[in-house]
Image (tube, grey):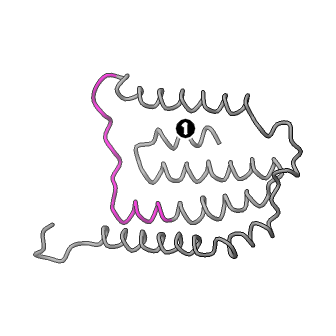
Amino acid sequence: MLAATLLCITRRNPVHAVIYLVTGFFALALMFYLLGAPLVAAWEVIVYAGAIMVLFLFIIMMLGLAPQEVPEGPGWQRWGPLVLLSSSLMICTLLLIFQDPMASKEIGDYYLAPQALGEALFGRYALAVEVVSFQLLFATIGAYILGRPLPKGEDS
């Protein structure tokens, strides 16, 4: 998972980066499954590796994004933001690991059954689920409008 994610953020070709990101999502789903959360693993594959990554690939291919050129300048300008972000994420991760509030509790205290989650999503939060689905529809329409070729004689 870490190797795929590292390859994702270091690739210049956007299609290759998305393919590596999908690989990382599949590896993350496998980790969820091995940790005893098969429902979360299935959602990871269906929602992230499936729907969202297909949408990303669709947008990248519609917009015709080409691989970026190698940036000019000293190495610290290219790698500085990555090192800063990685170190801050590592510090936050270590803080969360060492200060885990749920470490002393039983798994039953925060386990959510699939039936209860389904009842919450499609009962109590049905409106929010529908709003999100409309937002994804509008994003797809927007990607289509941005990616279509202009009619002849029309300048932007």
Give above or below for 58 relative to 8.
Answer: below
| Horizontal and vertical percent position of residue 100 | 75, 35
Q: Residue at x 56, y 33 (%)?
A: 89
Q: Amino acid at mark 1?
A: Leu
Q: Residue at x 66, y 29 (%)?
A: 95
63 in magenta = yes
Task: Choose between 94 and 43: the one closer to the eye.
Answer: 94
Report the span colored magenta.
55-74
Task: Choose between 57 and 107: the one closer to the eye.
Answer: 107
Label 1: how many Cα within 10 Å (few below 14, some 14–19, many 20+): some
Q: Is residue 45 left or right of residue 10?
A: right
Provide the secondary structure element on which disc 1 rests: helix
- Please give the count of numbered marks on the rendered protein: 1
Q: Is residue 104 left or right of residue 44?
A: right
| Horizontal and vertical percent position of residue 115 | 81, 70
Q: Quadrant of the N terminus?
A: top right
Mark 1 — residue?
A: 6
Q: Is residue 130 left or right of residue 135?
A: right
Give above or below for 78 relative to 129.
Answer: above
Q: Residue at x 45, y 42 (%)?
A: 11
Give above or below for 81 relative to 132.
Answer: above
Q: Residue at x 73, y 57 (%)?
A: 41
For residue 149, which quarter of the picture? bottom left
90 in magenta = no
| Horizontal and vertical percent position of residue 49 | 60, 59
